[in-house]
Image (cartoon, rainbow, N blue to C red):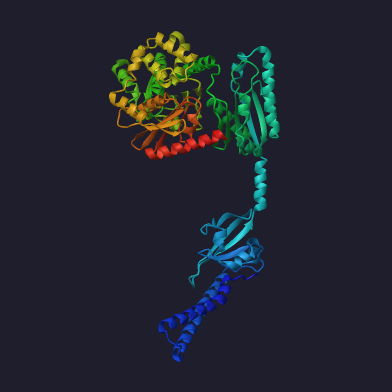
Amino acid sequence: MRGSFDLKQKNNILPYTVSILCLFLCMFVYIITRAEYHTDILFFIVVIQSTFILVGVHLFSQKAMKSNEVIQNFELPTALPLPYAIIDTQKKLLYYNELFEELCGEKLLNTNNKWFRKLFSEYDMKKQKQTLYLKQRTFDVYTSFYESKTNDLDTMLVCFVETTQYQNLEEMLKQQKTVVALLYLDNYEEVTESLEEIRLPILTAVIDRKLNTLASSVGGIIKKFEKDRYFLIFSQKQLEILQQKKFEILSQIREINVGEHIPVTISMGIGADGENLEEAMKNAKAAVALALGRGGDQVLIKEGEKYLFYGGKSGEISHNARIRARVKADALWEMIGEANDIFVMGHKKADLDCTGACIGIYTIAKTMGKQCYIVLDQVSAGIKRLYERIAEEEQYQNIFITEQEAIAKVSEKSLVIVADTHRKMMTVCPELLEISKKIVVFDHHRKSTDFIEKAVLIYHEPYASSTCELITEMIQYFGEKIKLKPLEADALLAGITVDTKNFCAKTGAITFEAAAFLRRHGADSVRVRLLFQNDMAAYQAKASAVKDAKMIYENIAFTVCPSDVENSILTAAMAADDLLNITGVKASFVCCLLEDTVYISARSLGEINVQLIMEKLGGGGHMTISGAQLYHCTIEQAEQKLKQAIEVYLKEEIK
């Protein structure tokens, strides 16, 4: 054992150091006295110098004895085959063996006894076991604390067990782990319908070639199991390479052109970090379903409970919308018929789309003679005028109930229908989802990771302009069974109008057909417009927000909406819409502070995906219309967080 004492070195050096200090003292005395040395003065100096030397030697010898005592208390074997060292509470090195010296280098040890805390700056003496890294080597470090009972020198024994080979092997196995991917062509049927029949084999061959090239580049195996679906397996290491390249296959598929047809897009769900292939396959299925629910043209990686997103630049695509609406309508009719009672709820702080959809579902349930309730947390300014119109009608008395009333009335056999959201924590009363065994979800927002999983019926279509459009589609298939009253038709049309920004955004053929159907059943555009009227203060607040807007990036506008007006959240959304009318503005963000929560309305013209930005802040929505809520936050903090989210998004897009 190599007794490498730093203290021993100190015992040899320090007496001489004290002597030198005494010589300086002599010079000092000489300067003061300005006289020649006399015998008595010299004698006095010698006495003082000798005293310093004796005291210094005694003190450091005593400290060395204490250190020896501590080392003996550890009862270390003379041939311990591990590097170890003894340090004090200041992380100063007291003792070490030859293996430790070989590990760290003798030259460094002999120069400074404080090097330990510099070389192992991450070392935490409070942890009995921890992992440290030195010169590309990995060590499990064990600490044993010794509290002295006879002196004040508390010490620690630090043992190093090298795990470099184990870590390298573990990393190698991780890199070789198999991941499973499912690849779905988002719009295969739509593309083939718009393509000449003679060019269809060419398109299919080009797609197959690009996907086979992808599989070959990652050393994987790909299998086509349906005309528009593929199965791919490859290694974790290759997945990391694809991530670095931001999955170029998305743009490669999108750029395929074999004639006049709409662009082909693909969605990929990857299951990684599974305990076995079965779990990886399960993760891949969940990931690809979520990718399709978010509009397609993207890659989702599911690692345990964590999701990673890539792509998502294209707009939503309708997939056999009419067939799906008819199937969902039949399923809803059957489920309502089997239920004892129905509870309909939307998201917190309901808007006109949410409330209008709830009214539409209420109409279906009442037509079937079922007891139906609409759960409402508060009457926000956005639905105040519609709520007042409903309250004036005697036939709609007591249709709105509170959360507490709903919890008291609901049972396992009750049917709970969620409208205009698919996120559990966004619903008015999440407790209902735990009590009921039958849950239905209707929503048009791009799918988030925290969606309601145990729903027995899900009608989730991100292509739709609004949830009211989805409900209206289903009502059309009920035919003469459902007779809408003018107020109910107004509520549904108001929901479509608010989410399409007066039929300017996210509108399709089905949107206008739904509006025409509602018009034929008594909806009136003038009455609907009255539901959107703002008072003068709200209009001035919107104008003020637009006036004070600033460009936080080259083509991104930001402003704050005054919160001292009625329905400031809706006013902020309208201000965000108006900012897009300014030349050069491609995206707009408007913040509004209510109590301790900042509401952010995000809008874009399509080039910038505001949904991806809002998701980084815990929100969501669509590519061009999104929002987020930041709790316990100030406007300044919200602006800073928003800028950080935008910067991350822009960096991802550049890559």
Residue for point 53% across, 23% down: 315
- Furthest residue to the bottom? 39
359 vs 127, left or right, is left
Q: Is residue 600 visible?
A: no
Task: Answer with the quarter of the image where residue 475 lies.
Answer: top left
43 vs 525, left or right, is right
210 vs 392, left or right, is right
- The count of marks equals 0
Relative to 404, residue 644 above or below: below
Q: Nearer the viewer, residue 556 or 283?
A: 556
Q: Nearer the viewer, residue 512 or 157?
A: 512
Q: Residue 334, how many percent across, how many down?
A: 48, 17
Relative to 534, residue 65 above or below: below
Relative to 533, residue 309 above or below: below
Q: Residue 74, how many percent across, how many down?
A: 58, 68
Q: Is residue 196 visible?
A: yes
Quadrant (top left, top right, bottom left, bottom right) of the N terminus: bottom right
Q: Residue 407, how many percent across, how many down?
A: 38, 30
Q: Nearer the viewer, residue 450 or 87?
A: 87
Q: Residue 257, how many percent across, how many down?
A: 64, 20
Relative to 215, residue 11 above or below: below
Quadrant (top left, top right, bottom left, bottom right) of the C terminus: top right
Q: Nearer the viewer, residue 228 or 405?
A: 228
